[in-house]
Image (cartoon, rainbow, N blue to C red):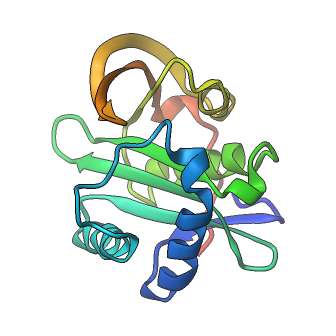
């Protein structure tokens, strides 16, 4: 169910240049909320790692494109688990030029459609963890259908310190799915 102005699709090798440029431009916006990459790992290496994990099937890495076909956000399903849980952990980030425009909420809604749709990944549950101070991301999660499930002290190391996170989740039956998924 893509909006006419936004389309979420899988990461492609041809996204490399624009992905790196967008991440560079958005670094200050994402800095307080995102783990630092290991020393010596630049954006080119991070892109290669993202693409490899997507291609292996352990994750679903996506980019949200505007009507002009430009990357406006990134939305991912990480740690995809089949078997007993059929779940994943969602992560997302908006391009700094598109912050507070609603594109991130739409991209996360489309990510959940991809996660739960039987022609997508066919998952049962998607979780997310967000720092309590990240009010914008918490609003995105709640607008997209996530509900608060708990609190995890010291869950993720960000900016040199272990940070608390609000735990959120959504189940397949809690999301209205479109009849088909976009390409």
Q: Position of residue 49 (x, y in %)?
A: 27, 70
Q: Position of residue 176 (x, y in %)?
A: 64, 39
Query: Who's the residue at 26% across and 74% down the image?
Result: 52
Q: Position of residue 91 (x, y in %)?
A: 45, 45
Q: Residue 18, relative to residue 8: is it above or below? A: below
Q: Residue 110, relative to residue 128: is it above or below? A: below
Query: Who's the residue at 74% across and 48% down the image?
Result: 99
Q: Position of residue 131 (x, y in %)?
A: 47, 24
User: Residue placed farthest to the left in the image?
Assistant: 83
Figure label count:
0
In the image, 87 versus 92, the foreground residue is: 92
Q: Residue 28, relative to residue 20: is it above or below? A: above
Query: Who's the residue at 53% across and 19% down the image?
Result: 147
Picture quarter with the C terminus:
bottom right
Picture quarter with the N terminus:
bottom right
Can the viewer see residue 112 in this picture? no
Q: Residue 98, relative to residue 34: is it above or below? A: below
In the image, 108 versus 46, the foreground residue is: 46
Query: Who's the residue at 42% across and 86% down the image?
Result: 13
Residue 53: image quadrant is bottom left
In the image, 75 versus 175, the foreground residue is: 75
């Amino acid at each position: 169910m893509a909006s006419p102005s936004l389309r979420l699709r899988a990461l492609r090798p041809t996204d490399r240049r624009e992905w790196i440029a967008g991440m560079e431009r958005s670094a200050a916006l994402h800095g307080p909320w995102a783990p630092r990459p290991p020393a010596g790992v630049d954006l080119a290496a991070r892109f290669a790692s993202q693409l490899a994990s997507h291609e292996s099937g352990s994750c679903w890495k996506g980019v949200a494109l505007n009507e002009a076909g430009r990357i406006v956000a990134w939305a991912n399903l990480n740690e995809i688990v089949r078997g007993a849980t059929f779940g994943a952990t969602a992560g997302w980030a908006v391009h700094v030029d598109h912050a507070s425009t609603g594109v991130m909420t739409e991209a996360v809604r489309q990510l959940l459609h991809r996660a739960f749709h039987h022609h997508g990944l066919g998952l049962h549950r998607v979780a997310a963890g967000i720092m309590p101070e990240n009010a914008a991301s918490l609003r995105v999660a709640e607008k997209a259908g996530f509900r608060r499930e708990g609190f995890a002290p010291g869950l993720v190391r960000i900016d040199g310190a272990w940070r608390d996170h609000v735990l959120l989740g959504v189940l397949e039956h809690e999301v209205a799915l479109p009849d088909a998924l976009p390409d």
